Image (tube, rainbow, N blue to C red):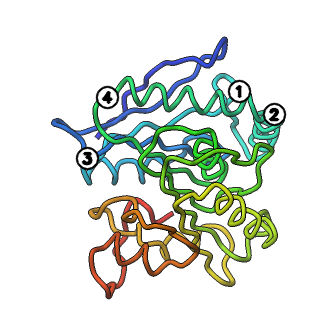
């Protein structure tokens, strides 16, 4: 399966997304916001698994011509992107707008890893009309806290030992979501840092729905998420899937 490069713009900035799908009507269109390194072979492997599971995917471009070649350049590029929160949100909206153009008339979701995990939460706070968002070891702090109802259901998977997300930011995120009555799940994994919690999430399987069934108040526990996503009360040993990162 090959990705198709799709050119798009955020104002004067030229961007390049990667689009892939099978023939027929996809189960949903998924915007994938990658890591601070932009798209990587690991992110693209997860996207391929989603396509195999019946989803259409679009990997967004954070930087355009400023795409980093190494960690040092990536940290600098990420710093410039995050320096203007409103401009960052506009960059993210451009990716969602392209997904809606390419994949109309089906549900849309967004997932993200690392910086991308922060990105999907920013889009939820921004009021984007999405079925759900999933943040994998993403940053939880924001310069623009939610101040209106959030449309998508939210799943946050993170490591409790992640040095970039201290516990006060985690509890602050919970309180922020409660204040706007969001439907959310947070799955912290004790003693782990970044990638470890992904396997703990019920999203490790590639075939069930991406998001848990809606609840009156999703809360912080992973059990409702696991049971509603998988449609069973007991879960087998997870198989590698598009959300093992």
Residue located beneath label 2 in the image: 80
* Between discs 1 and 2, the one toward the N terminus: 1
Residue 239, image x, y percentages: 34, 74
Frontmost residue, 167 versus 217: 217
Secondary structure beneath dot 3 equals: loop
**Which label number is shown at residue 27?**
3
State the mark number for residue 66: 1
**Can you tell which quarter of the image residue 93 is in?**
top right
Mark 4 sits on what residue? 104
Q: Position of residue 125 (x, y in %)?
A: 63, 45
Quadrant location of residue 162? bottom right
Q: Residue at x 51, y 18 (%)?
A: 8
Tag 1 near tag 2, CB within 8 Å = yes
Q: Is residue 41 left or right of residue 137?
A: left
Give the label, 2 or 3, closer to the camera.
3
Crowd class of label 2 (few under 14; some 14 to 19; many from 20; radius 10 Å): few
- Left or right relative to 39: residue 108: left
What SS does tag 4 mark?
loop
**Foreground label between 2 and 4:** 4
């Amino acid at each position: 399966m090959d990705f198709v490069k799709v050119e798009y713009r955020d104002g004067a900035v030229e961007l390049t997304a990667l689009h892939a799908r099978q023939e027929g009507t996809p189960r949903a269109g998924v915007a994938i916001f990658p890591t601070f390194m932009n798209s990587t072979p690991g992110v693209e492997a997860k996207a391929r698994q989603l396509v195999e599971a019946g989803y259409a995917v679009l990997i967004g471009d954070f930087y355009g011509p400023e795409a980093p070649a190494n960690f040092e350049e990536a940290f600098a590029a990420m710093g410039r992107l995050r320096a203007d929160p409103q401009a960052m949100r506009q960059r993210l909206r451009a990716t969602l707008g392209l997904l809606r153009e390419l994949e109309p008339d089906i549900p849309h979701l967004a997932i993200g890893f690392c910086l991308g995990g922060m990105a999907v939460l920013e889009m939820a706070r921004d009021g984007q009309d999405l079925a759900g968002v999933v943040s994998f070891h993403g940053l939880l702090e924001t310069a623009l806290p939610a101040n209106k109802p959030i449309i998508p259901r939210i799943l946050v998977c993170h490591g409790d030992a992640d040095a970039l997300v201290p516990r006060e930011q985690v509890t602050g995120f919970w309180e922020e979501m409660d204040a706007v009555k969001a439907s959310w799940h947070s799955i912290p994994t004790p003693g782990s840092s970044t990638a470890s919690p992904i396997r703990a999430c019920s999203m490790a399987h590639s075939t069930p729905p991406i998001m848990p069934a809606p609840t009156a108040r999703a809360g912080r526990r992973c059990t409702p998420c696991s049971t509603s996503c998988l449609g069973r009360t007991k879960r087998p040993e997870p198989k590698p899937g598009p959300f093992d990162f």
